[in-house]
Image (tube, helix red, strand yellow):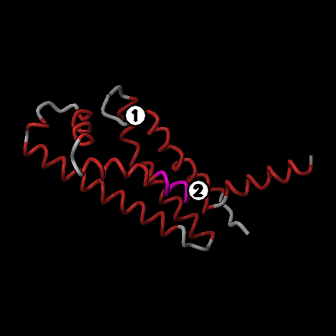
Amino acid sequence: MFFRYLEREQNKTLMKNFKTILIVTLILDVLQYIPLIIAKTGGAMQEQMISDLGIEGLADSAAGLQVLDVMLYIFGFIMAGTIAAVIYSLTLKTLEGLKAATFVLFIIHLFWTLPDFVTLLSGGSQHPPIIFMVLTLIPIIGLLYVSRNGILKS
């Protein structure tokens, strides 16, 4: 009984540990970044992205493909900046700094994924697969949780 209590308390501490949430966030961010890199290189992934956009004639339009290319660059740099911010947050040592950083990262992740959820709820079809959308909720919920309840692991 006592050992179960200690184990439960240890798990609570682990969940409130900033480093754990930031590492999970970093891993999921990198996994979300991979399709952008693959789509940027062209090939089947880019064709699938064009198909998913549902814009008729995009694949045959040089100007349209150029706009898509610029869009992928912009998204790539935004994701690279987000990943850099998560990595930097892992180096912070003060409770106040970590709480502020995780709250800012929560806002960034929330507004990065919000258009997909608005599209889904409004009945649109131009959103990522549902499983990926659920995965994007993990960092959002985790970052908000530790920004409010996080403790420094001793």
Is residue 9 found left or right of 150 in the rendered image? right
Q: Main secondary structure of the magenta part?
A: helix
Q: Secondary structure at mark 2?
A: helix
Q: Reading the chain from its start, which is encountered first: label 1 or label 2?
A: 2
Residue nearest the viewer, comparing 114 with 78: 78
Q: Residue at x 56, y 72 (%)?
A: 92
Please state the total of marks drawn on the protein image. 2
Q: Secondary structure at mark 1?
A: loop
Is residue 33 found left or right of 148 in the rendered image? left
Q: Which mark is residue 129?
A: 1
Q: Residue at x 30, y 33 (%)?
A: 126
Is residue 129 found left or right of 1 in the rendered image? left
Asked if residue 72 is among those painted magenta in the image, a careful observer would answer no
Task: Give the quarter of the image for residue 151.
Answer: bottom right
Q: Residue at x 27, y 41 (%)?
A: 45
Residue nearest the viewer, comparing 108 with 41: 41
Q: Residues within 10 Å of mark 2 (few under 14, many from 20)?
A: many
**What quarter of the picture does the C terminus occupy?**
bottom right
Q: Which residues are magenta?
A: 23-28
Identify the residue position indicated by label 2 in the image.
Answer: 21
Asked if residue 25 is among those painted magenta in the image, a careful observer would answer yes
